[in-house]
Image (tube, rainbow, N blue to C red):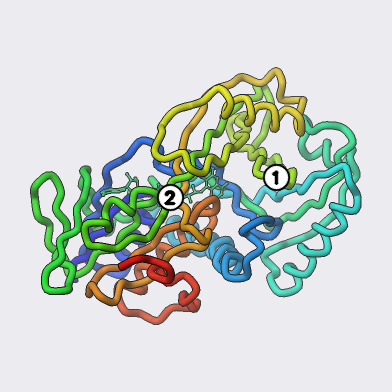
Amino acid sequence: MKIIVVGAGIVGASTAYHLAREGVEVVVVDQQHEGQATAAGAGIICPWISSGEEEHPDWYALAKAGACYYPSLISMLEQDGETNVSYRLVGAMAVNSDEEELDAIEQKVRERQSETPEVGEIRRLSADEAQALFPPLKSGLGAVYVSGSARVDGKLLRDAMKRGAERHGVLYKAGEAGLEVKDGKVAGVRVNDQLISADAVVVTAGAWISKLLEPLGIDLSVEPQRGQIIHLEVPGQDTSDWPVILPQNDHYLVSFDDSRVVVGATRETGSGFDYRLTAAGVKEVLDEALSVAPGLSNSTLKEVRIGFRPFAKDLLPLIGCVPSIEGLVIANGLGASGLTMGPYVGSAAANLVLGKELDMDLTPFDPLRKATV
Ligand code: FAD
């Protein structure tokens, strides 16, 4: 069996890696668009403290499965010699000056912990204790600390899965793929005027999926949502164990090994594929970060990234087969939580295309649930 994966963000990289480990012949085609979400993502893996669309039970079930899947993936990658993935359980702190808000967060996290031990230890911290764990934090913010929260650098993880997949024989091809369908069945993809035939195609094309499916008359209404995100360097500080900071809005701070604190991000619905930094976007991100962590005021502004999150209209992911086109599988729409869900969703997409049993009911994520076909 030969399978093509279109897109090599976290979902495509994971799909190809899992297929390759099953010994399947795989070709990955990736256009490397500017604004790949995986390359810009902050890397917070913490579905336990959530809000907004994340309160939807189907969303939470998938995000939980994603967070719980990470240790298995990391150990698979280790077996394949890939250890530079930056995944680490650093814990997260929901911070707030309002003790009642923290009470509500703590109660919800404790409920989740009762059914999911991976949530880890939960501790209520005083403002001084919170600042001891994250020194740049503003004074007077108490916290709910949750130990089972992690961070990962999406680029490093994507590349580790890519190398792992290549070691199992996967071929990578740069270029924009167009789908080829014949007699109601996927025939392969066309890249740079060359037809690559296959028995099945898994489409993991992120925010760009609509362009790929429109010629087949399928409108999934996936939209790009721009995120601008800033990397700060805190010279001389060992930031490697600093917990993720979650101030209960769309903004956050997440630290990595090399004195780096990533702060973000804008959520610009309706942005289209406008790959630009904007004055208002950068201001918003810095204002929000420094209001929570004024101790970062003198950090070095190293880099600003832009990514397009793939969002479905109802904010739920899109994962499944297209019944009218044999051999076509879609894994998309992971929105603001694709680094959490992506590795698990990739493994599910691999199982789907191979016709294997799934360990989760994906019916709520039927990609055609509201599509025009
Ligand atoms: P992408 O990573 O965008 O990859 C899609 C790939 O498909 C691209 O490489 C593109 O070039 C390719 N492609 C598209 N069309 C074609 C074609 N026709 N032919 C060939 N190739 C094609 N998630 C979390 O869990 N935690 C976070 O903290 C977090 N923070 C984020 C912060 C920001 C600023 C952003 C932007 C996102 C964040 N996310 C986070 C979300 C996460 O990054 C995304 O949901 C996830 O990366 C989407 O992965 P993907 O593989 O679906 O798409």
Q: Quadrant of the C terminus?
A: bottom left
Along the horizontal axis of the image, is 54 left or right of 9? right
Residue 156 visible here: no
**In this orientation, which residue lies closer to the viewer: 8 or 52?**
52
Report which residue position mark 2 lands on. 223
Mark 1 is on which residue type?
Asn
Residue at the spot x=34%, y=64% of the render?
A: 330
Q: Are marks 2 and 1 in contact (CB under 8 Å)?
A: no
Question: Dot 1 corresponds to which residue?
Answer: 249
Q: Is residue 369 left or right of residue 90?
A: left
Where disc 2 sits, the SS reads: strand
Q: Which residue lies at the image location 26% right of the left edge and 54% below the top edge?
A: 212
Q: Which mark is residue 297?
A: none
Residue 67 pos. (x, y %): 58, 61
Amino acid at the residue labelled 2: Glu
The residue nearer to you, when weighing 360 against 261, is 360
Residue at screen point 21% across, 50% down: 177
Tell me where residue 35 appears, x and y as whole percent. 40, 38
Give the Cα distance between marks 2 and 1.
Answer: 21 Å
Res. 259 image quadrant: top right
Front residue (pair 271, 160): 271
Relative vertical location of residue 299 with respect to residue 68 in this rendering, above or below:
above
Instruction: Give the residue furthest to the front.
Output: 372
**From the viewer's perspective, is 320 left or right of 137?**
left
Would you call the spot at circle 1 few (<14 residues within 10 Å), some (14-19), or many (20 or more)? few
Report the quarter where the N terminus lies.
bottom left
Mark in the foreground, 2 or 1: 2
Mark 1 and ligand 1: say if the CB distance to the nearest ligand atom is below 8 Å: no
Q: How many marks?
A: 2
Q: Position of residue 336 (x, y in %)?
A: 54, 50
**Mark sitting earlier along the chain (2/1):** 2
